[in-house]
Image (spheres, rainbow, N blue to C red):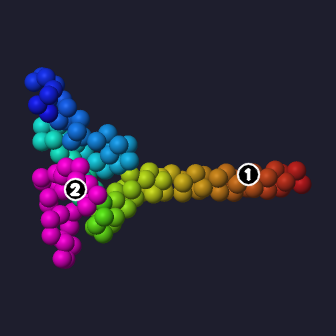
């Protein structure tokens, strides 16, 4: 670091600490705060709960982690549970609104079918 210009050191340090491939691979859950030069886990923040025998969950929410901690963080079982919960939350096809819309279109098709059948019956009876 000493061989770089003083004005470039901070930029180089950030580039070293902030691995851009992290964000490509983990873009839906990884939050980065430049001021603290640390990454934070959105999934842990959203779904953090009291899991027995799992100390240190607050570390990924309050303190963040550097590059060396990312692999350790991703290797844990709580991480996998929280990521699955986060994916389910962000999946719009599983949302309640989507379920109602699907049901509404189905009901609408059924209503039109019944209405057309009723109209056909009335037309048939009127022609007799």
Viewer-proximal residue among 2 and 56: 2
Q: Single out the residue that lies furthest toward the right.
A: 128
Report the side of 115 relative to 51 (left or right): right
Check the picture and name the quadrant holding the N terminus.
top left
Viewer-proximal residue among 96 and 19: 19
- Quadrant of residue 56 within the rendered picture: bottom left
Dots 1, 2 in contact, CB < 8 A: no
Q: Single out the residue that lies furthest toward the front.
A: 3
* Label at residue 116: 1
Report the side of 26 relative to 119 (left or right): left
Position above or below: 53 against 126:
below
- Residue bearing the label numbered 2: 69
Residue range (magenta) = 45-73
Q: Residue placed at 18% from the left, 29% from the top? A: 11
Q: Secondary structure at mark 1?
A: helix
Viewer-proximal residue among 94 and 111: 94
| Residue 8, horizontal then vertical, whole percent | 16, 25
* Label at residue 48: none
| Residue 30, horizontal then vertical, whole percent | 28, 48
Check the picture and name the quadrant holding the C terminus.
bottom right
Q: Nearer the viewer, mark 1 or mark 2?
A: 2
Does the magenta run of residues contain 70?
Answer: yes
Does the magenta run of residues contain 108?
Answer: no
Q: Residue placed at 14% from the left, 28% from the top? A: 3
Report the side of 68 relative to 115 (left or right): left
């Amino acid at each position: 670091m000493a061989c770089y210009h003083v004005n470039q050191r901070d930029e180089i340090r950030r580039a070293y600490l902030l691995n851009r491939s992290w964000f490509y691979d983990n873009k839906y859950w990884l939050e980065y705060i430049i001021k603290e030069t640390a990454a934070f886990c959105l999934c842990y923040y959203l779904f953090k709960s009291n899991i027995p025998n799992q100390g240190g969950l607050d570390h990924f929410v309050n303190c963040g982690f550097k590059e060396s901690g990312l692999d350790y963080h991703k290797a844990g079982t709580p991480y996998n549970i929280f990521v699955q919960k986060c994916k389910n939350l962000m999946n719009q096809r599983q949302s309640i609104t989507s379920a109602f819309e699907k049901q509404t279109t189905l009901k609408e098709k059924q209503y039109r079918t019944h209405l057309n059948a009723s109209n056909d019956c009335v037309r048939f009876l009127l022609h007799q």
